[in-house]
Amino acid sequence: MSRLPVRKTYKLFIGGDFPRSESGRTYAAEGQNVARASRKDVRDAVRAARSVFPKWAGMTAYNRGQVLYRIAEMMEARRSEFADLCSGPKEVERSIDRFVWYAGWADKLAQVIGSSNPVAGPYFNFTVPEPQGVAGILAPQEPPLAGLVSRIAPALVGGNAVIVVASEPHPLAAVELAEALATADVPGGVVNVLTGFRDELAPVLAAHMDVNALDVSGADGDVAELERLAADNVKRIVRGAADGQSAWEIEPFLELKTVWHPIGV
Amino acid sequence: MTELERKHDQAPIPVGWEYETAPESRDIVTLRERYGHFVGGEWLEPKETYTTISPATEEPLAEIGQANEEEVQLAVQAARTAFENGWSSLAGAERAKYLYRIARILQERAREFAVLESLNGGKPIRESRDVDVPLSAAHFFYYAGWADKLEYAFPNRKPKPLGVAGQIIPWNFPLLMLAWKIAPALAAGNTLVLKPAETTPLSALVFCDVLRQAELPPGVVNIITGDGRAGAALVKSDVDKIAFTGSTEVGKAIKRQLAGTGKKLTLELGGKAANVIFDDAALDQAVEGIVNGIYFNQGHVCCAGSRLLVQESIYEATIDKLKRRLQTLRVGDPLDKNTDVGAINSEAQLEKIQELVSSGEAEGAEIYQPPCRLPEKGYWFVPTVFTNVAQSYRIAQEEIFGPVLSVLTFRTPDEAVEKANNTPYGLSAGVWTEKGSRILAMAQRLKAGVIWANTYNRFDPASPFGGYKESGFGREGGLHGLAPYLDFE
Amino acid sequence: MAQAPALPVGFELPLEPRLPRIGSIDQVALEERAASLAKRSIKREAKMFALELAVRMTDLTTLEGSDTPGKVSALASKAIRPDPADASVPSVAAICVYPNLVPTAVERVLGSSVKVASVATAFPSGQSPLETKLEEVRWVIERGADEVDMVIDRGAFLAGRYAKVYDEIVRVKKACGETGLKVILETGELGTYDNVRRASLLAIAAGADFIKTSTGKLSSSATLPVALVMLEAIRDVYDETGRRVGFKPAGGIRNAKQAVQHLVLTHETLGVDWLTPDLYRFGASSLLNDILMQIRKEKTGRYQSPDYFTID
């Protein structure tokens, strides 16, 4: 008799925990039953993100960089699992290297994006980048791992907390990533992963008044409607590359603060 | 209810509390009896050796190679070969991963390296554990992130590695200076030959094991040991760039030597920093800052706040607090976690300090040294304060590189700036005032590469460090620390 | 309009300054200094002495709405004989209770060296009229309280009405007469270290015999940095005037390790002179048992279990 395997339950990742959807629903994807998040799960995820945001943003850039590097470490340990859930090892390697790449930006953003400004007067004037707060991200439907990583890493490195709606047809890579995140010293709530129906969850995220940015790079369908909903609290709408890396992917998730101070004895 | 006794507060109070000796164990460090030169990923048997010791006990620790010209040439050749056969064409992202590995391994072996630094160099374990080793790992971590992002660092320039760098580092922060040199050089795509200081070679030699663990390709980093002769040989050799941190005198000699050769050069030399205290400073914290400025690492710091410029209106209060604070400084075994001030690095350095201190007394300054029990063996100097110091005294002009503070006064901000800048050096300065605009005004006017306001001796891989004038040129740390290792032609 | 009250005798201000410069505190440097002192470890012999000293300097406290004579009686027994299994453990300095429980407390400690400290002045908020506060002080003294722990009016302090804060302390001190007065600053509400120093100097100028950090009713209380600020204020007053004022950290000191850290801080800042119950008290409840466990561990060499120490 061959051994009966123990099947995995595919749950959501909210606040560092793995709860089922509060609605109790699931849906079938990639031959598995996956949690089907509801609007209340979105609500809980936003709450978790908001609550941990001060801690994440308050960490030194060096610390944040180390956390992102550790995400890469944990992903590396799960290479074969990831490879089965996306297009293959090349996509996995690209995704891991992408986290390493973004990890290195944490303590360099201020020097590249910030500045000291030579104003015409006896004032010291400097501009520093700051995270916006809570970002809602609609992961590209494809590629299931690299797309997800390409969108959440730039938001995280600047100090934002993130709620990501996973690819609807291929959500398993996102769940695997959540499991890697849970062992990567990432404070609970910094990344929240919701699996479920895109057209059910995206409008909730877009309309949520306590979400500061909405990344529509992976949105299909009616982006205009999402933008309309996002207008009520003047969310920043981010459109970036579904599978690329650049410092300019980080920048749309940042605020810029400029400070003046007189110079005089 | 039981019978109650009348008790009085009769227990005697001890005359002084003794702190427990809290020694960090040496067991974590394994040393070989003899080290050669690390060339092309292998250990080269040295032709000539000398002994390196622990300055706290004068105990011999290991035999170290004294590199001759031929051995130096072999190292440079190995670096050249490694550069041409792969390292220069390796993708930045892959170079980055080697550097990240080194950072992570250093973090894992942090305790071992901290003990080693204190053992070989004499600095308190608290400093090597809390400052030197963590910053070294952080430096590798920071520059790892630049290796594949060079196109962002210099707008409109296409940077390329220089080739082979020759690097010579001092004995005051052996591992940290190694990190400051190696990390940006490798991130920029160069290979290198590094010579640690004669008295503190061990952390560099044990670092070679970290390189082995990280599987860094052979020849990318080469370590040769020895005194100034080995350094001179490296300067003369076929490298594309020299980076030197050390005394101003040697720095000038190197600059003369390289004149006309086309080799790139960066120098980080001495300093005689002014620590300026205004009457509105947070005074208790300023006193901590003064102490940190000159007694941290026994004053063996190029950017040490060795001249205290205190506003005359708070002179008495400051000096009283300072003297009281000096009485609680603990000088002793570097491996004891309660020690504040460790051993002087070498007999030679101790003699230099003693000579300058004598000159101070001879020229008329008033000396204060707290009562202090010093160990029998080893090289020690009691933390010292000179008051009634004139700007012209040798102790106010020359770098002592020891735990000796000279105190001068000023009346107005203008006078403070004038006195602070009145030196051929320009590495660092400190400003203590609660008034924001004054911090910025002083920062604007002080001629120094690093200005610490309401703090002192703070270092970070993201923060560029380097001097004005005779304190050297070029910056280490930050985005700007990449430039010296890149070719922009 | 508020009138500045007459200063008590001995506080006349001649031309030379009689109070230290108020000045500023740098938060980052202060917290770093406190943290580095917290890492000191003292010699074993000194440790045993420190633990017993900590017991002798404890104000064993119960300040709950639910306190009853029964509760306070049990506390008093514990205060007199903290460790029934070890007669060499000394009594604590005092027990600290609410006014209504003062009579019971006084009766129960009679014949021992344990003093009775009473909170007063609308503890913990201080938000009551001065007359009722003074009445409360007189009431507890008449019933035998040896010491009074008052709270300052933080509302007035934060609104900048320093003269009112000062005046209240002066009047309470007058009502105390010979009875020792501890002034609670409630540092957790003051917001900045600068304010802690200001409040410390203000309270001392107004006649405090002790300055105390907290009521123990807030979560943030006697941290090492706050203690350092207050000890430095005490030191500066001593340097300037020769007057010794005591210090009582209260709230948040739950184990022996923290207590020893506080003692180390005091030793580094003020020297051995302040290491006596006349000038130093720990305001604590659960601290005592942890100290007893550490004492027994030092004596027997074994780590202890709370099961072997009475709750009261």
Image (spheres, rainbow, N blue to C red):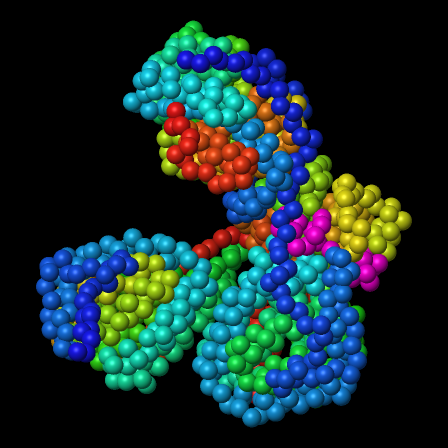
Residue positioned 52% across, 81% down in the render: B215
Residue positioned 73% across, 70% down in the render: B62
Q: Is residue B179 left or right of residue A250?
A: right
Q: In the rendered view, tell whether residue A152 sits above or below residue C276.
A: below
Residue B489 place in picture, x, y as percent:
57, 88
User: Quarter-wise, where is residue C155 in the image?
Assistant: top left
Q: In the rendered view, tell whether residue B90 sits above or below residue C243.
A: below
Residue positioned 50% across, 61% down in the render: A120
Task: Confirm whether residue C265 shows in the render.
Answer: yes
What range of the chain is rendered magenta? B331-353
Foreground residue among A101 and B151: A101
User: Quarter-wise, where is residue C242 in the image?
Assistant: top right
Quadrant assignment for the N terminus of chain A: bottom left
Magenta span includes C307: no
User: What secondary structure characterizes most of the magenta part?
Assistant: loop
Residue A220 place in picture, x, y as percent:
16, 76
Q: In the rendered view, tell whether residue B400 sits above or below residue C32.
A: below
Residue positioned 61% across, 39% down in the render: C44
Q: Is residue B16 left or right of residue B386?
A: left
Magenta span includes B336: yes
Residue B197 place in picture, x, y as percent:
72, 71
Identity of the residue furthest to the front in this view: A1
Residue C30 place in picture, x, y as percent:
55, 43
Foreground residue among C219 and C64: C64
